[in-house]
Image (cartoon, rainbow, N blue to C red):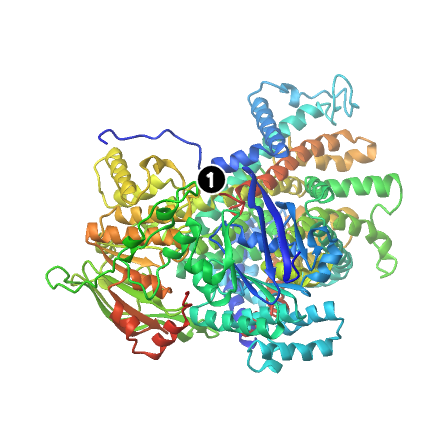
Amino acid sequence: MSSDSLIEIKNLSVEFQTDDGQVKAVKNISFSIPRGKTMGLVGESGSGKSVSSLAIMRLIPNPPGKITSGEILFDGQDLLKLSEPQMRKIRGNRISMIFQEPMTSLNPVFTIGDQICETLMLHRGMDKKAALAKVVELLDQVGIPNPAQRVNSYPHEMSGGQRQRVMIAMAIACEPDLLIADEPTTALDVTIQKQILELLAKLQKEYNMSVLFITHDLGVIADIADQVVVMYRGDIVEQGRTLDIFQQPQHPYTKGLLACRPSLDKNPLRLPTVSDFMTEEGKEKNFDVESIKQVKASRPVQEEKNPVLLEVFELEKHFPTKKGIFGNVQEWLKAVDNVSFKVRKGRTLGLVGESGCGKTTLGRSLLRLIEPTAGQVLYNGTDVTSLDRKAMRQMRRKMQIIFQDPYASLNPRMTVGSAIMEPMIIHGIGESKDERMEKAGELMDKVGLSRIMLNRYPHEFSGGQRQRICIARALAVSPEFIVCDESVSALDVSIQAQILNLLLDLQEELDLTYIFISHDLAVVKFISDEVAVMYGGKILEMNDALGIYENPQHDYTKKLLSAIPKGL
Amino acid sequence: MSQSQKPPARRNSLWWDALRHLRRQPLAMVSLGVILFYVGLALLCSAGVIFTDYALVDHNRPYQEPSWENWLGTDIFGRDVLARAAHGSITSLSVGFVGTGLALVIGTLLGALAGYFGGRTDDLVVWFYTTVDTIPYILLVVSLAFIMGPSLQTLYLAIGLTFWVSHCRIVRAEFLKHRERDYVQGALAVGASHWRRIFIHILPNIFHLILINFSLVFVTAVKSEVILSFLGLGVEPGVPSWGMMINDARLELPRGVWWGLAAATGFMFFLILAFNLFNDALREALDPKRSRV
Amino acid sequence: MFKYVVRRLLYTIPILFGVTLLTFLLFHIAGGDPAAQAAGKHASAEEIALLKAQLGLDRPLHQQYFFYLQQIATFDFGRSWATKQNISSMFKAGLGPTLSLTLPAFFLAVLITISLALILAHLRGSWVDRLSLVLCLAMMSISFLVYILAGQYFLAYQFSLFPISGWDPDPILRWTYLALPILIAVVVSIGPDTLFFRTVFLDEISQDYVRTARAKGLAEGRILFKHVLRNALIPIITIVVIRMPFLVMGSLLLEAFFGIPGLGGIMFQAIQNSDFPVIKAMTFIGALLYMFFQLFSDILYAAVDPKIQLR
């Protein structure tokens, strides 16, 4: 083995036992991580990237998982041949790991000081006092303010970003040779993500560690990794220096992955998708790269074609946050605070903001899925907030919503056909069942699915397909206006591009009006005509899409924009 | 596309998925077989096809030991113990099914209304079930039994009116959770009525819990019959029931008569064990977290 | 924390009201004609009417309800119909014997079943675990009454390991009589409790923080005993504390069979004799205890779950 590699993975295979038999999660992969460098492991869901990292730690739950073959040479020693007690001496000591969910990865009933101490006492044989002193030092190093007091905090008393810092402090406590970071910033807001990435880069240099950084986000990889391994369905399709991979991707999957990501500095008409570059079987397709260079012209407002469809006037939504002894509300959270804006017909308003900014509450209040506290929502001049139940039901034919999580937004006990036909039944569309079935079939065609799938259940579809079904269902009542609430956030980038293209096509074909809610500025930029930035329940700034990005006015917008990983 | 394509019916719902999983568990299938055996036994007994001599009194042959003639011996009146134990399954199964059914209907309805509508409705239902839950169940049953006098109907009501509480609590919590889920919000967004959201959307999605609770409450109901019989609040004297037989053993055991107790205990044991084992497998098969593609 | 407790206390008021109302109505309907029963079978119509007036049963319903509330507030439940004793003093006499049966049974059972469950959780998926699971389910498939009958018959009557039944007021000597009922109570609880605790532990083991603990290099045993057990305490407290009213109410069946003069035994007699005042008082006290322990468990949560102190 070459001496500059810290860890070398050879022919690793992992299988999982499922109801449908053995599933190969990782297929015979080999790669090595150089000393003192950051290796990026990138792939979409189901690519086997997390399983590979858990295999290094030998933490794959068994059953159902099993490492079926391979070697993991760590400093020349095969980890797979170690006994469990020997392996425990390595975990948390020479190889440590941080995880995606900072909210649940810490034990809720122990203070963070206790939890970090545990590692030090275990591997370094320190006594409690010495360990605590070291913990304070570590917390300071990972940027927790007031570390001496914070050691006594419980996880629930800290924010998500802080908890991830605590996880990092725990991981570096024993100065490991290798730090495995499994999607450490995916659950965090972009501004927090930037801080964590900077922290990791700083610590990597200070400790001269190797880092295995696992992510689905190519932008993040470009910022942090020296080398990249690209995984696809359990295989490594490409590996090399980060710069090479980004500038001259060889494998069609990598090419597709890089191209389909909306980015801030490009302004294409449509997004290319992985399937433009690669067939289902993984063969390269001839794709005219020039076609993606077409630039979207900004669409000027035409008064007669784009009249104001929706006008929101001083909308408010308050939630009680603190109740007194008698259940009387003492404090309110203003989730939506005095928001006013207009949306014109046939256009898209992007609503962007970080978690907790009130964008989802706003979207739902417009449709009265949540009753607004005050204010007006004028739809074609009618105040939606004052409609009675019957009139509101009629109004729902015109206004629809597509949710974030396609796994949660379809009733799992209802066939896709019934789900699409349900709105028709409610609103008396179609004379007979056959007619409705026919229309459901047409909708399936329209969203790019086969009508033969109508009698299947949601669990038989992939995430992207389910999102298409949700769109078909929303279209079943022929609406004019659709709220897309983080509708592509839960999807892999390659699927995200397809859905975004579909939404654009449908807008053009059906003259739809969208409010597109997202935390992802690049996605919002790609799809929107106008963009509003939300923070703390208020709209801070609103402008046309190019204007917001090229000439941000508000400090928060600037901060948000600068936090986005640049890619290359 | 003029003709409306009717795709062939496919057994691909989550229910079929659970059933397929269940069918691969031998223990679950054996348990189901045992339960069906008891149901068949009770039906045949009540139809008068088998063990017709269960009430045949023969004062000349009290407390006969098990023999070829009376496989499980006779009781104090010379009646065949095996026949009486077999007929006891009618009492137990009907108490189990009717009492449990009643409890689940009450619990599901109240829980659904409370969890779905929230607010004042919820306060009222929670107040009501907390109150009922606070009163020791045995005393609640006792007072109900006093009102109605001992009979099979009393048992149904006593079990139905007390055992709904824990189920109601679960259903309420599930409705609270599900009403915020996107698929229910989506139904609201397309204009679905309350009725539709409760019964077409949420209820089928928590039905697996109702099913699991059914076998839990069923087991408790069958066991309660024994205790209530001991307190003199069970079925009328003369009606064959396992509870009565177990109670009679208090006087029989000191005389060395063990077969009455053994018969009733054995019959009850296999029924309840089958329900317990089946429930365990059912829980796993219906677990939404069980890995699916 | 203080506010949390006060809110919790205030919440018991409507429940208390509900309990009094429900018990009053139930026994009003169930009681048939209490005056007729109290006066005896051979009483004349005049005598019954007189007694009714004495007991206040001829007054309108809401006045009777207020009378009942008064009884409750003063803990004066009147006299038993069967024994003519003062109910409050009957309860006082029964409390000691009941606690000496149920307290040891309760703590032994909790200790044993939690240990068993921890062992099973550690061995999860192995044949020992699977076999124990079936064994627990089998133990749950036998009636409580059968355990008592069989235990009394075999262990006490056949093998004479224990006295069959009886009681000694002496606090030391009574243990010979208590040993068998305690043993039976513990055995009966092994099936359901072990299974319950095992499920609680397994739920915790699948949490993310356990994965973190493993990634630190902790051994399975330490993870189970430190991290998992501490978290599992929260659901365990619920089930354990809710069972506590049983400590005071006594096990009706055990006391009836083993002749222990505790509250359970008193209740058993009252049910046999349709002794309404006793049943009614018992019902109310049982409910009160339940409420008290519910409150107690909610306060205990605050000690175990760091999140609650914030509320």
Name the image quarter holding the N terminus of chain A.
bottom right
- Label 1, on which residue? B14
User: Picture coordinates of residue A548 (x, y %)?
Assistant: 28, 72
In the displayed structure, would residue A360 be above or below residue A474?
A: below
User: Picture coordinates of residue B206 (x, y %)?
Assistant: 47, 46
In the displayed structure, would residue A565 be above or below residue B89?
A: below
Along the line of sight, which residue is nearer the eye, C5 or C255? C5
Residue A280 occupies quadrant: top left
Q: Say which chain tag 1 marks.
A: B
Seen at 74% across and 33% down, the residue is B261
Relative side of B153 to A419, left or right: right
Seen at 22% across and 30% down, the residue is B2
Along the line of sight, which residue is nearer the eye, C184 or A249? A249
In this rendering, the count of numbered labels is: 1
> Looking at the image, can residue A323 be seen?
yes
In the displayed structure, would residue A280 be above or below residue A534?
A: above
User: Picture coordinates of residue C42 (x, y %)?
Assistant: 63, 46
Disc 1 marks a residue whose amino acid type is Leu
Relative side of B277 to A459, left or right: right
Relative side of C61 to A132, left or right: left
Residue A515 occupies quadrant: bottom left
Along the line of sight, which residue is nearer the eye, A219 or A322? A219
Relative side of A102 to A470, left or right: right
Q: What element carries label 1?
A: helix
> Looking at the image, can residue A313 be seen?
no
Are there few (<14), some (14-19), or many (20+) residues within 10 Å of tag 1? Answer: many
Name the image quarter holding the C terminus of chain A.
bottom left
User: Picture coordinates of residue C248 (x, y %)?
Assistant: 69, 59
